[in-house]
Amino acid sequence: MIKKGFEPIRENKLLRLKADLVVVGGGLAGVCTAVVAAREGVKVILVQDRPVLGGNASSEVRLWALGATSSMGNNNRWAREGGLINEILLDNLKRNRDGNPLIFDTVLLEKVHEESNIKLLLNTAVYEVQKSNEKTINSVKAFCSQNSTTYLLKAPYFCDSSGDGIVAFQAGASFRMGAETPEEFDEGFAPNIEDYGNLLGHSLYFYTKDLGKPVEFIAPSFAIDNAGELPRIRNYRLNEHGCNLWWVEYGGRLDTIHQSEEIKFELWKVVYGIWDYVKNSGKYPDAENLTLEWVGTIPGKRESRRFEGDYMLTQKDIVEQRDHYDRVAFGGWAMDLHPADGIYSEHNSCTQWHTKGIYSIPYRCYYSKDIQNLFLAGRIISASHVAFGSSRVMLTCAHGAQAVGKAVALCLKNKWTPRDLAAKDKIRLLQLALNREGQSIPRLNLSDLEDLTTKSKISASSELELTQIKESGDWKPLLFNMAQILPLQAKNIYRFRIKLRAADNTTITVALRTSSRETHFTPDVEIQSKTFDLIEGEQEITFISDEPITKDSYIYVCFMKNERVEIMLSDERFTGIMTVLQKENRHVSNYGRQEPPMEIGVDTFDFWTPEKMPAGKNIALTIEPAVQNFSSINIKNNDVRPTSDGYSNVWLAQLNDEHPQLTLSWTKKQKISMLQLFFDCDFDNALPSVFVTHPTSEIPYTIKEYRIYDDHKNLLYHKLDNYQAINKVIFDKPAITAELNIVFTKKNLNIPVGLFKISAYSENYL
């Protein structure tokens, strides 16, 4: 037994821990920072003040993680974030395609648990920063309420991904909170603060369940009694729950840090008042058997402090898709601002303005301009209020955090400050390290001199030359404008033959469109248009381009809507080729066309968006001359997804090649210790982490099985059950060979085997 007598005062148990990096905040940004750094050999302490990881994506809040794809509601083709966060989403798809938030918790916890270089402290809140001088953090103090232990955490580098920026704030770093005026950064979308408010509020969700019998609900005394008068009650639909209730928002006129508990209680009052109205007003008779299954206890917080780096992201960076020399991540969510009064506001629940394409984010946004050993990750990075409206979403936060994790490893190795790494003669080290892991920094073409593949000769058992997308027998009515996207070559005059079915004598207009800039996939330039007479019944039309294609580019073969006409579809699918429709996606303020007020500095353009699989089939057509964009030489490219400059960047075998092979050969033997293979994981498909049910647990395009042989036909490696985008193959001992032969097993009858990239490295790289 333990028996202690009276003492005037006692101290909590104190543990002193040292590491190379302390990450404060265990949301998606903190998790990605910690795991990426740990995989580089950095000793990490990850501190999270909640019992689970994930922050707003966790089971405590239950917000789906979204990013540049914007729920497949914008023109950002093949824009899902790469690297570690994509690995997490694919793991979650494999194990949790029904979107259970509890399972997503385990996916994140497993990622951290598997890294021996990470010390995880859950239920532990940082409350004090100690500095060695005014510009340098020495340590932080934290307390765990579950084990009554105080921690003193010391490291040469710190990353604040805490959401409110507790470390950066206490360290004295420059920050902003609230909206700038339009004049400060020439931002036409900057809000009228008096009317619209300064900050975005918190949201609190609830879930309902049908018990199959009548359920009474007696509201608590604190519930509001006028829910029927709320301006946003019109948004409510019976059986709608979870993050579809994002509009249950409040707090933007309060201090979203120090009044957060008041905001939460007000949201509880609103939630229980809404449910009282649903159950007892008589206006929802179908709610009789419904009960409340879950109400959030932690609100999803959108905005608080933003800390200043050596660069501040602004509206024009996003709208103009400016490419900075130190770009390390990308975003693509709309600039998405919400009225401060939230649920009580007469304004629309949000105002979202999209851009024509994804934008890049500079590394200089990811560290404090004042504190020389402090990195920033998550929603607190250096951005104006308007730019924050886009950069704040979780997948964008996680993508940038991956850059922080890599940056820490480079700074630690070279004894650099975060600012040192931002120098033009150093930043390419970070960019190359990120792109090697599938970061896909936009429009950045870096040579990897250590990649032995670049010195090899590439050959393949077959290469796709696309002359036909075969018909399936399925017809689709042209209720919307519809386009087939194809990567076409310069100097060619193309001929397309398409099968149509008309309900009566009518016409169909076919147009060729392309993008005005190589920075986006918005088809805002019409090359030519032709109208064809149709007679009742089935027929074929042939569209011939009048002029050669002027440059290699993605071309949209557009069929303008006519409800009396149907078009033949195909079951065949190909990497880098897809269909889009000019239709609405109201969840992300896409109404088919965006027409903002002229004075706010945002583009007017049409939306052409895909349908989620298993819909979204290609149009059946023949193409002359063949599309030749799928050569095996593409595996030497730095890009591991289709890009808006007109390249698929993928090797595709012929569709009838049952055992496709790629061969890498050198003039002399190489000593190869590691290979990386980059597969197609359908980067156009949004993979929300929770709430959404996905049709399959694996991406149909991704190769499941392959074998690697040396020049003597010795089997070096056999993968049976792949579902990930990136496979890192480390040989037990280096393969000394002048040839590598990779044999793939075909997975799907209607999808050819494909591969974006192979990288080969010697033991010196490892």
Image: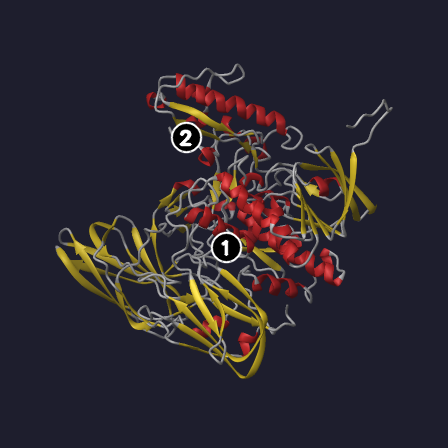
Which element is circle 2 on? Answer: helix
Q: Position of residue 683 (x, y in %)?
A: 45, 56
In the image, what residue type sits under mark 2? Asn
Q: Is residue 548 left or right of residue 345?
A: left
Image x and y of residue 418, in percent: 72, 56
Task: Tell me if I can see residue 699 in this picture.
Answer: yes
Tell me which label, 2 or 1, sits earlier in the chain.
Answer: 2
Q: Using the image as rendered, state which of residue 14 and residue 628 is in the foreground.
A: 14
**Callout 2 environment at 10 Å: few (<14), some (14 to 19), or many (20+)?**
few
Q: Which residue is mark 1?
A: 358
Q: The C terminus appears in which quarter of the rendering? A: bottom right
User: Can you give x and y, in whole percent of width and height, for residue 588 in the image?
Assistant: 44, 43
- Whether pointer 2 and pointer 1 mark residues with C-beta atoms closer than 8 Å, the reply is no
Q: Is residue 302 above or below residue 705?
A: above
Q: Position of residue 214 (x, y in %)?
A: 36, 19
Residue ID for mark 2? 235
Question: Taking 640 as reference, is 97 above or below it?
Answer: above
- Looking at this view, name the residue that lies furthest to the front: 1
Q: Residue at x 40, y 21 (%)?
A: 278
